[in-house]
Image: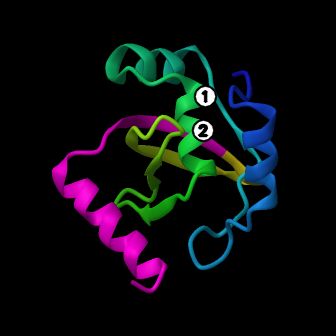
Amino acid sequence: MAIAGFASAALRADLRRRNWSSNVLPVRIVEFEWDDGNELHFALGHGIAPGEAEEVFALAPLYRKTERGHYSVFGPMLSGRLLVIVFELKGGGIARPITGWDMNTAERRYHRRQRARRHGS
């Protein structure tokens, strides 16, 4: 298994500066775990490159814990594309992306409402 970061250096630096532990995640994410399996699944199954998935973590993310004990992150890419990324939180602040997709209408509505709530609107 290889660990590689595909996001730009600026995005990775922003990710490290953020405090992910503030009532959202129990640990700070410092790296992403990609291998041929999950990278191929994202690319062929969902049209998402690793760097695109990583952008969601760096740009105004919203997190939810899933019923299976994983986490999902809802957020935008720099291009404005809205994605949901499901990931496993591993030791040492490593996030292993499992799957992802473009937000559907209900997920966009959830994302919009949660962002408004977060910003006091």
User: Quick one: 109 or 64, which is closer to the camera?
Assistant: 109
Determine contact: label 1, label 2, CB under 8 Å.
yes
| Residue 64 lies in the magenta-colored region | no
As drawn, 96 above or below 73 = above
- Which kind of residue does numbered mark 2 sit on? Glu
The secondary structure type at the circle numbered 1 is helix
Q: Which residue is mark 2?
A: 54
Place residue 3 in its image quadrant. top right
Image location (x, y in percent) of residue 104: 21, 45
Relative to 32, 39 lies left or right: left
Q: Which residue is mark 1?
A: 51
Image location (x, y in percent) of residue 29: 71, 53
Q: Which residues are magenta?
A: 95-121
**Residue at left 62%, top 20%?**
35
**Residue at left 60%, top 38%?**
54
Crowding at mark 2 (Cα within 10 Å: few <14, some 14-19, many 20+): many
Relative to 58, 114 lies left or right: left
- Which kind of residue does numbered mark 1 sit on? Gly
User: Quick one: 28 or 119, which is closer to the camera?
Assistant: 119
Visual colour scheme: rainbow
Crowding at mark 1 (Cα within 10 Å: few <14, some 14-19, many 20+): some
**Residue at left 73%, top 51%?**
15
